[in-house]
């Protein structure tokens, strides 16, 4: 099996992982892919079908990564909004105590 065929095998495993909702496993395989690519010989015409298949899989993987990043960003925004709302209540409670103390 060539280095590029090994990368394709990893890309297939990554697609299976992201389709199962396991983006972390797919991301964990990136290092292994990187090592294989770094050590691989230059590509030749015979490698074209394998490279195209890797790129097709990479589109699926990249889309899953992008969706996960957007979901994390949205969750952080919701948490920040909720925290901001709660801090507003805390200030109102503190102000009410001060007014009660002054009365």
Image (tube, rainbow, N blue to C red):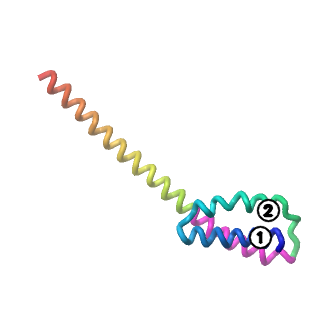
Percent from the top left, x then y, of residue 98?
20, 25
**So how many labels did they put on this image?**
2
Residue holding disc 1: 6
Neighbor class of circle 1 (other Cα within 10 Å; few <14, some 14-19, many 20+) is some
Residue drawn where x is 56% and y is 65% of the image: 22
Percent from the top left, x then y, of residue 66?
57, 61
Instruction: Report, in whole angstroms, how far the alpha carbon at label 2 lies from the one at label 1.
Output: 8 Å
Callout 1 secondary element = helix
Give the magenta part as a residue range. 46-65
Q: Is residue 90 above or below residue 55?
A: above
Residue drawn where x is 37% and y is 47% of the image: 81
> Is residue 88 located in the magenta-colored stretch of the structure?
no
Percent from the top left, x then y, of residue 69?
54, 57
Q: Do the residues labelled 2 and 1 touch (CB within 8 Å)?
A: yes
In this picture, residue 92 sits left or right of residue 79: left
Percent from the top left, x then y, of residue 28?
65, 59
Callout 2 secondary element = helix
- Of the residues under marks 2 and 1, which one precedes in the sequence? 1
Residue holding disc 2: 36
Neighbor class of circle 2 (other Cα within 10 Å; few <14, some 14-19, many 20+) is some
In this picture, residue 89 sits left or right of residue 29: left
> Is residue 55 located in the magenta-colored stretch of the structure?
yes
Main secondary structure along the magenta-highlighted residues: helix
Residue 15: numbered disc: none
Residue drawn where x is 86% and y is 69% of the image: 43
In this picture, residue 57 sits left or right of residue 96: right
Q: Tell me where residue 35 sits by quadrant.
A: bottom right
Q: Tell me where residue 55 sits by quadrant.
A: bottom right
């Amino acid at each position: 099996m060539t280095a590029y065929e090994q990368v394709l095998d990893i890309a297939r495993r990554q697609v299976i992982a992201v389709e199962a909702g396991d983006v972390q496993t797919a991301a964990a395989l990136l290092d292994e892919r990187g090592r294989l690519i770094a050590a691989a010989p230059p590509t030749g015409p015979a490698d074209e079908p394998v490279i195209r298949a890797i790129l097709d899989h990479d589109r699926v993987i990249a889309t899953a990564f992008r969706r996960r990043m957007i979901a994390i960003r949205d969750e952080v925004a919701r948490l920040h909004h909720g925290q901001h709302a709660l801090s507003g209540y805390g200030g109102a409670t503190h102000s009410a105590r001060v007014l009660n103390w002054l009365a």
